[in-house]
Every structure is written in structure tokens, then in C-alpha cells.
Amino acid sequence: MSEDAAGTGLHTEDMTLNVGPQHPSTHGVLRFVVKTDGEVINEAIPDVGYLHRSIEKIGEKCTWHGYVPYTDRADYLAAMFANQGFCMAAERLGDVEVPPRGEYCRVIACELNRVASHLIAVGTFGQDIGAITPFLHALRERESINDLMEEICGARLTYNYLRIGGVGYDIKPETCARITAFLDHFEPIVDEYNRLLSYNKIFIERLANVAVISKEDALQYNLVGPNLRASGVQWDIRRDIPYSVYPELDFEVPVGRGERGTLGDSYDRYYVRIRELMESCKILRQCLDKMPDGPAVAKVARKFKPPAGETYVRIEAPRGDMGYYVVSDGSEYPYRVRIRTGSFTAMSIIDKISPGIMVADLIALIASLDVDAPEIDR
Amino acid sequence: MNGIIEYCQNVRDTVRSIFEGMTITFSHFVRKPSTVQYPDRIAQQVQETLPLRYRGILEVDMDICTGCLACERVCPINCIAIGIEMNAETKQRDFTLFDIDICKCMYCGLCMEACPTGSIRHTQEFEGACNNPAGLVRHFITEKVPLYKPKKGGETEPRMIQKVDIGKTYMDEIAEPEN
Amino acid sequence: MDFTVQDLIATLLPGAVPAALGYALAAVAVAFAVLSFFVAPLAGVTSWLERRVWARMQSRVGPNRVGPQGILQWLADGVKNIQKEDIIPASADRKLFLLAPYVVFSGFLGAFVVIPFGSWLIPADLNIGILYLLAITSLVVVGILMAGWSSNNKWSLLGGMRSAAQIVSYEIPAGVAVLTVIFLSGTLSMQGIIKAQGWAPWDWFIFYNPFTLVAFFLFFTAALAEGNRTPFDIPEAESELVAGYVTEYSGMRFLFFFFAEWGNLYVIGAIAATLFLGGWQIPATIFGVTMAEHPLLKGVLEFAVFFVKAYFWAFVAMWVRGTLPRVRVDQLMAMCWKYMVPMSFICLFGTIVLLVIWPEGNTALTMATLAVSCLIVLYFMWRVVYQIMHSRPTLYLKPYV
């Protein structure tokens, strides 16, 4: 029993709502136990674990090379990054140098994947707010990226493109030309998408000043990636703990500015992703220009046995800081693999932010954090 | 006063952004739909439009398979089963079994990279639906066949030259020569 | 040639039959005819058209297999829905649950009683037509609330509550906008309102003065809200409330709700056409043919004109649905009470003031309003061209796929 907000002295009973595991906007199998007073949420407790596939345990049973395709499944919307994290960890353990062309191929593939993943994020965002047309426009563009990926590595979703020591297959010049053509087509589409959805007054009203995450909260709850940057924290692994060829590239790190409301509101989290789309396009163009010749993969033994040791690798995935903690005991199999993902920590802040917002805002909050169920549970 | 200005701005922004959005959706009436009407109303079979690197259902050319078991070993999911036994009559080793369970296969492509002759390949075929999961196990051996042994100095038989070439082209396309 | 259905019954009726029975039979026959030969196919075709329109906006194709271009898709959907099991939740309030779809449906179907399809083609020209219309369409909210409550499902309950709040609130701007027209026409009868206008755009109430132009859009927005259409589809908000008040319904009962929703699109358009767009009005002579001499041709033309006007606004509703996101429930209320209600009253008082100054209307003001509207349409066209030039898509000018 709780007293109503208006202070009329009337006692109302809390209603317990089960949002999920099957609900149109939980983006996979998620569950929230929501206690509401009418439409206003008093408490929303995330319940995770419905999509646990023990990917970390499988790592102990697979060879080093054989585990790469499994990492795809850690986050199927951004499989390339999961590949990259594991490959970098293995390379660091085994002291493998990736040839420059291999690094460029990796960055091209990763940034294309980031565009695809952010397109899903902003598209489903529109859908959760009720606009289905922008969602399909975003998916249409993502489909072109899938076609490009198919040409680069032969798969559309679970790429398994990266290998320990480089990439599986070189990117051909004609594919590079197609990527440039796609970028030329894509950049005006982002503008159009902005005019259709981002600058729509109803959309702005739905997101501005909703579910504000302050800088302090974001840091305390360990938010990462776009969610952290939307709260005004300048932090991007690509720039601050550089890896691969990112130091050679010129790109900006979009940070939330609170342009339509408060710093760290849902609109900032949305718009940071839109701006990252454009930054990724910039990175892609630079990579295509600078791509050196040479082999795309280093010579790595088929029976890869890194010396005993442990390492922790951080990369900037679309959902933020993705960490791989890998332990080797010098055998053909990794001794331990642990994956740290951005969505998992993003889930924990929902409990903190949700009291006082409405049911519709909870949907906006989940969408704005861009959580991805397989990545939460792994 | 500020309240009135804000009120008018809200009305103006709402009308303007809705107007703008409606021009965009209206302009889509003259744009080409990007979807295709799979499977019957398409100009070309989807399989034909896929790139050579596409990782579809696996096939094995038994004529150029050396039986090195590299694919079986590298497969992270153990979906390839190969059986080899010594033939007492010919004193040669024969294949008794070469099954790929495409139900289990995760199309990672590690096997075809490991293959020294390019005999195990991903095809452009992706339509594998059938009523019984048992039908998804592809048997490449119907009767015992001997293992392929590459001839020193190249193949002479035209049929075999062609097959070896197909394998080589495939390997050049997808695998790295250095590796 | 100015006769009504009542006159028709009087002529056809044999002397021996009591007049009351004749009227009752006629009423049933008219209801049956309207439902089976007009409303059902209309709602069905609207559902198909909406899907096609939506699909094209989203770079898709849409249903195009059943019948030419898929126009019979609604029949296939209907047959499929009838075959489905009619599930009634064990904990539902059974009687209310069963009744709710029919209440919604009758609320929508009742509107057709006063919709004037032509100068004599109207089931009943009530002298309080528009008042009746506002009243009968409010019956929908009763049905939705019943469905939401009786399903005994929290999503349904939230949907039903949202719907009640929404429809009751939006009655006010809609009613005030209608009142603007009633002041101009001086009658509540639907035929009377149409007869007060003319066939030409400058004779329509929408361009009568700038206030009526705004009142029209206020009315249309409020009507969308009453019809639970995007951006006001919060009672069934798919991404929030699963399916809102229809969550527990299946099969034919589910279909009835959507039947009403799609049929309602046409009703919205028809009311808009009647009140603001001159209804079925056509010129007295077209290409030298005097319409009064050809009653059949006149009837067909009137019907066609009315249908096109009404259906255009149904199309606009589909188009809006394909464009806009959904508002939140408190914003919906704020929009109604803070923006639409004051604006509709401004329109009403503005019209009254202008009516006091120029009781017979002011041609210059009307023409200016018309010119501004034309400029807006031209600007719209230019923006469409700009959008195409900006994103350089592959053009495909055929209307079919």
C-alpha cells in the first residue's frame, strides 16, 4: 500500500506488472518486474538470465581458433567486436603481430558493424516509441551492410571474420569501391532519418528530460560506451586506450550535450548514436584511403598454444567497453575466458532510474540504453 | 510573456516537424521498394546473386579429398564425421563414411580453410529446410571410395584437372596463401 | 428530384401493410445493405490499402498476392480469423468480455445512419445529425473500457483506462470545432450542413476564414485521437502494452475491434468531408449537362465526389500513422487541454466575431485563405521533390508492385 502522489490521503495498491520475458519491446528475452501505481513506476527490477548459453564455459572446451565463431554469438548484433576482443587477447598472450593490412581490414569490418548495430539501436528506438517507418528505413540500410559483409566474409550476421593474427579473407578492391558507394548513399540517408525521426517534436518530447542519468550515476553504475558518453563523460577506448590502427585515424568522440533537454536524458543517448554513425562513416572513408598492401593475416600455428599467462583486453564495441579476460595455461585450449559486456552493467541502472517514470518511459529507457539480451546473459 | 513565446514555438515546431516527416514518407511513394518477393517473383535465383565467399551449406568433392582429417579436427562443433579403413584387397585406404550434419554446422568456415585441396567448400545453397532432421545429415559416401592422392607433376586426366582447378580457385578466393 | 429514403418507402409500401412495420423492415434492410455491401468491404479494403500504403512508405511491397494487387487480402484474413479458436480467459468477466466487441462495433456502425452519401442517399437525415454522430461514436469508448476491464489482464486494463481518458478528453476540441461549422450553417442536420456549402472550394467551410481552416485540422486531429490512431494509439500501444485492450481477444472478436477501427477511418473522413469540404456537392451543370435532368448520373457523381473526399482523409490518417511516433499518455492529455481546447475556442470565437462583422461572409478573406492553403500545398510538393533530390533514391513511378 502506498499513498498517492497527490496527497489526497487515498490509499492505492501497487500493481505488479511483468514486462517480459515475452514483450514486444524487451529486445530479446528480458524480464522486468515492475511495480506501478497506475501508470507511474515505483520500482522496476530487471531479471536477467533467460538467454544464458554459457559461452564463457564453452571457451574452455574449444581450441583457440575454434572459439572465435562462438564469440560471434556473444553479441550477434556486433559479432565483429566480440571476435576482435578475443583475437586481440589471444594475440597478446601468444605475442602475435597483426600485419597492417589485417588491422585495416579489421577496423573497416568493425566500423561497418558498428554502423549496422547503431542502425538497429536507433531503428528499434523509433519502433519502441511507436514509429515503425524509421525502423524499417534503418533496417533497409542495415541490409546493405549485411550484403557488404557477405562479400567481405561470407556471412550476414555471425561473421567469424577475424582470426588470431589478422582476418580470414582480404577485402578486395571492388568491395572497397562498394563500401565507398554505400557511404555516399548512406550519409544523406542519415540526414533524412534525422528529419523524419530525430527532429520530430513528438519524438523529442517523448525522450527529452526522460530518465536522466547524471554523470556521477553513470560512472558509479559503470555505464560504458554511448550511454556513458551521453551523460557527458569523455571516454572512448578507441581514443583513450588506443588499440589497432585507431591512433592513426582522425575521428571525434560524440558526447551528450543535453541539446533538447537535460544532459544524460534519453534523447542524448539516442543522438550520441546518430552522431557516432557519422563518425564511423568518417573512419571508414579514412581506412579505405589509407589501406596498405601486404598480407592480411600473420602466420599463426594451426595448433595455437600461447604461453601460460593472463590478459585483459578492452575494446570499444557499439554497446560500450567490451572486455575479454583470458587465461592460458599453455595448452591448446584457453584455461578461462570471461567476457565483460556493456549491456549487463546498463541493466543495473534501470533499477535506480525507473522510480517515478511512466510505463511508456521505461520502454524508452530500455531502448535508449540499447541493451541486447544475448550480450547481457552471454 | 516567455510562456506565450514558448507555447507558440511548441505549436510551430510540432506542425513543422510533422509536415517535414510527412513529406519524407510521401516521397517514398515514388521510391523503389527495397524488398524482393522471395522466392517466386525475383528476376534471378538468390543463390546466383551470392558472392563466391558466401558460406552456405557445405559440400565435399570426394574425388579430391585426401582424407587428411584436417576439417574434422578443426571443426569446433564436431559436425563432420569421417571414417577411413584399410582395404585388404587393394592395399589402399578407403572412405567408409563422410557425413556432415548441417543441422549442427554453424557455417564458420574453419574447415574449408584447413582443407589442403579445396575439396570441402561452402556452396551458395542455403535452402535446407526439410521435415525430418535426419535429412539434414549429408552423406557424401554411398560406397567405399579410395582416398585421393595428388600425382607428382600434376594431374593428367582432364576430369581431375578440372576438379583440382575448382578446388584451387576456391582456395585462392577465400583462404590466405600465406596461411 | 429532391426526395429521401422515407419518400421511397412511402411510394413502395402497399396500402395494406401498416406503415410502422414497413419502416421497421426498411430499417433492417437498409442496415443489412449498408453493413454487407458497403461497410464490410470498405473496412476490408481499407485494411488492405493501409498495409499497402504503409509498406510503400517503408520501402516494402505489402500484400499483393490475393486477388489483383492483393485487394482481396481482407477476405483471406477474415476467413482465417473466423477459423481461429475463440479464446475466453478463465478469469475474464465472461458476459462483458463477450459483449465488448459488439458495443464497439455498434458504436461505429451507428455512425453510418446519418452519413450523407448523396443528396438523397442517406439512411436517415436526422435534424440533430451531427449531435447524434458525436454521441454514437462515444459508444466506442464504452466498449473499449468493457474489453479492458473484463479481460482481467493488466495490459488490457491499462489500455482501457488510457482509452477512456483519451476519448473523453478529445470529445471537447472535436465538439468545439464542429460547433464552428454549426455556427456557419445554422443547422445540426448533416444534409443541412452540406447544403449550406457549395461545390467549389471557395464555398467550402474549410476555406471560409482562417479560423475554420485551423478548426478543420483541430477536428481531424481530435478525430484521429478518438479513432485510436497513431500518434494517439496509446490504448493499444504495441510496444508498451503488448496489445492494450485487445490483448486477450482472438479470432472473430479480435477482428471486430479492427473492423471498427478501419471502418472508423472512413467515418472520420466522411464527417470531415461533410462538415468542412462540401460533402457531395457537385456543380448544377457539368459540360452542358444539367444534373437535375439525370437523377441517376447525379446520384453516382455525388456518391463518387463524397467518397473521394472522405477517402482522401482516410488516406491521410494512414499516412500520418506511417510517419509519426506515439505520444505519451500525459502528453496526450497536455496536448488536448493545453493546446487543442484553447485553440478550438479561439477558432470558435474568431469565427463568431467574423460572422458578426460580415454576416454573409467575406469573399476576400475566403480567397486569401484558399490562396494560403494552395501555397502550403505547393511548398509541400517542393519539399517532397527536395527529399527525393537529397537522398537520390532509385525512382519507381508505378503505383503497383
Image: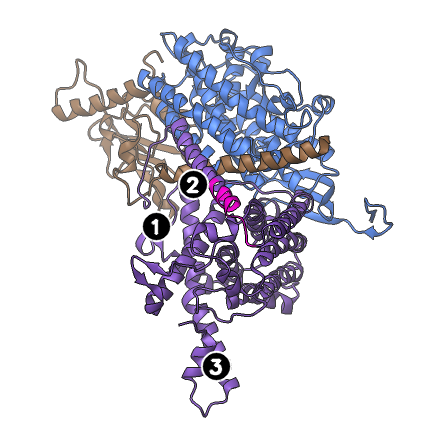
> Could you say where residue C113 lies in the image, as x and y percent from the top left?
52, 68
Mark 1 or mark 3, earlier in chain: 3
Q: Nearer the viewer, residue B62 or A259?
A: A259
C296 in the magenta segment: no
- Disc 1, SS: loop
- Disc 2, SS: helix
> Could you say where residue B16 lies in the image, as x and y percent from the top left?
54, 35
Mark 2 or mark 1, earlier in chain: 2
> Pointer 3 indicates a residue of which chain?
C
Which class describes the residues within 10 Å of circle 1: few (<14), some (14-19), or many (20+)?
some
Q: What chain is colored purple? A: C
Main secondary structure found in the magenta portion: helix
Q: What chain is colored blue? A: A
Q: Nearer the viewer, residue A36 or C324?
A: C324
> Pointer 1 indicates a residue of which chain?
C
What amino acid is labelled 3 in the image? Answer: Leu
What numbered label is drawn on residue C64? 1
- Disc 3, SS: helix
Query: Which image quadrant: the C terminus of chain B?
Result: top left
Q: What chain is colored brown? A: B
Q: Is residue A269 above or below residue A241?
A: below
What amino acid is labelled 2 in the image? Answer: Met
- How far is the residue under mark 2 from the one under mark 1? 15 Å
Query: What residue is pinned by disc 2?
Result: C57
What amino acid is labelled 1 in the image? Answer: Asn
Q: Is residue C194 above or below residue A19?
A: below
Asked if residue A280 lies left or right of residue B8, the reply is left
What numbered label is drawn on residue C25? 3
Which class describes the residues within 10 Å of circle 3: few (<14), some (14-19), or many (20+)?
few
Instruction: Write the start and end of the magenta stretch as one range.
Output: C360-371
Mark 2 or 3, closer to the camera: 3
